[in-house]
Image (tube, rainbow, N blue to C red):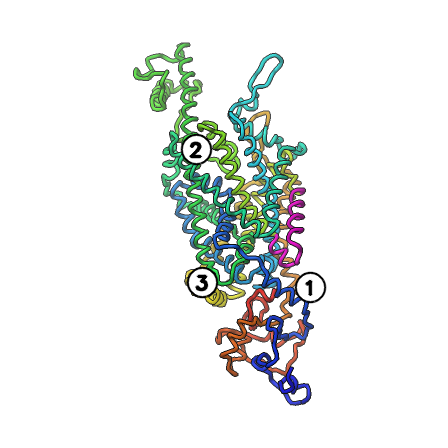
Amino acid sequence: MPKNSKVTQREHSSEHVTESVADLLAHQEPVDYKRSVLNVTGESWDKQKEGDEELDAENRPAWNSKLQYILAQIGYSVGLGNVWRFPYLCQKNGGGAYLVPYLVLLIIIGLPLFFLELAVGQRIRRGSIGVWNYICPRLGGIGYASCLVCFFVGLYYNVIIGWSIFYFFKSFQYPLPWSECPIVKNGSVAVVEPECERSSATTYFWYREALDISNSISESGGLNWKMTLCLLVAWSLVGLAMIKGIQSSGKVMYFSSLFPYLVLVCFLVRGLLLRGAVDGIMHMFTPKLDKMLDPQVWREAATQVFFALGLGFGGVIAFSSYNKQDNNCHFDATLVSFINFFTSVLATLVVFAVLGFKANIMNEKCVVENAEKILGYLNTNVLSHDLIPPHVNFSHLTAKDYNEMYRVIMTVKEGHFKELGLDACLLEDELNKSVQGTGLAFIAFTEAMTHFPASPFWSVMFFLMLINLGLGSMIGTMSGITTPIIDTFKVRKEVFTVGCCIFAFVVGLIFVQRSGNYFVTMFDDYSATLPLTVVVILENIAVAWIYGTKKFMQELTEMLGFRPYQFYYYTWKYVSPICMAVLMTASIIQLGVSPPGYSAWIREEAAEKFLFYPTWAMAILISLIILASLPLPLVFILRQFHLVSDGSNALSVTYKKGRMMKDISNLEDNDETRFILSKVPSETPSPMPTHRSYLGPGSNSPLEMSSAPNGRYGSGYLLASTPESEL
């Protein structure tokens, strides 16, 4: 350093010297601004660590194009729930009327919180652990809780992909193996399999051929080797897609995100050409306006919005952390949110077009079976021929003619009508049969496809679509684990990804036992809903109330180049936290009111039966909720009482060369304090005495006496560089 610098003068003089940023930096000898650190803690500077952090920030992977990033976010948010959960909720909660609460809640909850996660990921450029450690160290458990929930969800979600892989390979044969009941030999007599005869061919194939399911969760029954192999294939696909990070997963997204739309459009066109498709679509969109006043409808709509966008998992933050700082994430949030909504509507159109066709087929079967009963009663004189209208032709009996005949018989034989065992055979009854989840994909939809011309082709397309929908969501879910862990602990990407997939496969073997479907139901119902709701509430509070909404809006203005709408200020600060708190309360009440149980398939009865979880299963269920939520209080306590370091006492200012030179060029003497302490004059704390030294974490340091808030350090100091230089 030159001899005339103020730092050198201080070494040879007892006179008090106040050095300025301009004096420290504007020397003739070259200064490496990337390594220049203003250390106010008295701690030694770890040059190697600082170099590693800066190198990591500079070399962070990035998306090859904006299209690749958008497809990744769409692939993550658009998943199996859009295909088999949203149509069910739409049917159950008022048809077209359900779209109103869903769209309202998407705008006031989904879009603002989705934008918030995109913004913090892009701003801080770290995974969920690093992001929430930066914003509020005491709430750093948010990131760890997100990782745990992602792990729990990934365990059973990949099992569903395994099921789809099994059906995909079974689709390469004609006729489809679930189109007819199998014939078994009973001695010298060939009979239809009794379990299949009492249910249906598709139901039998799902429960017996695919899952080989046991009668209860307590009966393990050993591993199902077919599903074990399919699960291995599923985890291999995920591992290969993830092993190089976004360099490999980004390329996979071009196919896995776009292919489902191609299939949905093909199914929609084919479905609209089917007889009865219009009946299904009209049934779906006929609004039942009274349902809009039901609080349960709004709760289910909020839950669907919440999970449809993947909030709280960390995948959204992970993907956005690979963006450039000036990327317009507000546009991304709006685009992805509404693409997600329109995908749900498109999938609903497809599902109800196909289910309308299936309902017509089933209704015709019902008419034929009951017409045969009536003919039998006529031949045995149980019913008089006078009861049959003259225009009715049993060889070409329509549903309308049958309904007319049914009403006449019911009126005349009012006292003995039940003994006849006749069904009404109403199309509306078939359309009202609510089916969701695996029941929709693997039973109802597969049954409908057996009646399609060229049914194997459509079956292959359908299950390949499910595989790609699941794979896109799994890549996002696994990124919610790998990105924060790799960022925080600097482990090798390839080694950790492979190890994570192997470990998940081993743990996931509980889902491919004969009782595995019951564990899938348990994890789906209880492992994510409540913990994720708490996580998102704390995310909202951390940004809006601890870090500060005004400060966050100001940083977004600098990052995006324009100020976001004031709408986001009020939704982040007031509307979203209140709505999420109401949703959490409703979820807790729902968990308390609904008995913890599952639908078991009883082989002897060939029917589903609701069973309560045994004590040991209840212990697992409660442990899932506690374990997923445990990092939140644990990290808070450890950092509140200084049992572990949170980095809040290691305040350093790293000067990026380009940015520093730009800001220094117009720096005046009276602006030096504002330059270090804040970019906004109104946020500048009172100047502190220069002679007072830092006394340690247990003392009232000048840093801690500052009144201006800062989310990471609890002081008025803001970093002069971008946030990633501090992680």
Q: Earlier in the sequence, mark 2 or mark 3?
A: 2
If you read the primary sequence from the N terminus, does the residue marked by circle 1 or circle 3 appear first? Answer: 3
**Residue 79 within the magenta-colored segment of the rendering:** no
Residue where numbered disc 3 is placed: 569
Task: Please indicate, yes or no, whether residue 640 appears anywhere in the rendered image.
Answer: no
Residue 353 is drawn in which quadrant? top left
**Sequence-wise first label, 1 or 2:** 2
How many labels, in total?
A: 3
Location of residue 313 with respect to 417 vertically, above or below: below
The residue nearer to you, when weighing 289 against 635, is: 635
Task: Tell me the quarter of the image containing the C terminus.
Answer: bottom right
Instruction: Tell me which segment is drawn in magenta.
Output: 482-506
Numbered mark located on residue 643 in the image: 1
- Of tags 2 and 3, the one toward the viewer is 2
Which label sits on residue 355? 2
The CA distance from mark 1 to mark 3 is 35 Å
Counting other residues with Cα less than 10 Å from the Cα at mark 1, is it few (<14), some (14-19), or many (20 or more)? few
**Residue 482, x across and y down, in percent:** 61, 52
Residue 505 or residue 623, whichever sits in front: 505
Query: Is the residue marked by circle 3 packed among few (<14), some (14-19), or many (20+) residues within 10 Å?
Result: some
Q: Percent x, y for residue 613? A: 61, 38
Magenta stretch encompasses residue 488: yes
- Label 2 secondary element: helix
Q: Amino acid at mark 2?
A: Leu
Question: Any mark on residue 436, and which?
Answer: none
